[in-house]
Image (spheres, grey):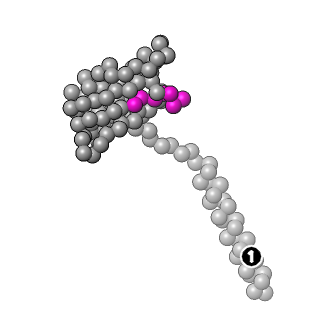
Amino acid sequence: MKKVITAIALLLFLTTSLTSLAQDEAQPVSKRIPRWISDKGYWVVESNVKSPLNSIIHFYDNDNVLVYREKVDGVKINLNKSRTKMRLKKILEQSIVAYEKSHTITENEQWVAKALR
């Protein structure tokens, strides 16, 4: 009798766990993407803790191709500000358009320095 009760309890447990898993998969997952993330590419900021006023910013397209690079001197880039991120997004999209026209990597056009000052 104990084996029958254990088997029924196990079957009941498996049934409820499988239905709860099926319900979790059926619900759509909606993640909110921040506004500063571009669908055309991404950017990377290289800086040093000892010299925060000197940075190098690399802009890449979605194929991981470097499209623009700029060395910024005398400006501390605060990546905690959404305004800074939005400006970098704008420069990223501008540099991708310029790269698509000429297919050459541009460097130090001072787009970032002008935008952040």
Is 42 left, or right, of 11 in this rendering?
left
Residue at the front extreme, as displayed? 50
Residue found at x 35% / y 38%: 46
Magenta segment? 58-65
Is 112 left, or right, of 28 in this rendering?
left
User: Splitting the image into 4 quarters, where does residue 87 fall?
Assistant: top left
Q: In front here: 71 or 98?
A: 71
User: Splitting the image into 4 quarters, where does residue 112 fall?
Assistant: top left
Whether residue 62 appears in this view of the structure is no
Residue found at x 48% / y 43%: 31
- The percent coordinates of residue 44 (x first, y second) are 40, 36
Which residue is tagged 1?
A: 8
Q: In front here: 57 or 38?
A: 57
- The percent coordinates of residue 115 (x first, y second) are 26, 25
- The percent coordinates of residue 84 (x first, y second) are 29, 33
Q: Quadrant of the C terminus?
A: top left
Residue found at x 38% / y 33%: 36
Residue found at x 67% / y 61%: 18
Q: In front here: 82 or 30?
A: 82
Q: Vertical placement of 63 versus 21: above or below? A: above
- The percent coordinates of residue 90 (x first, y second) are 36, 25
Q: What residue type is labelled 1?
A: Ile
- Residue 101 lies in the magenta-colored region: no
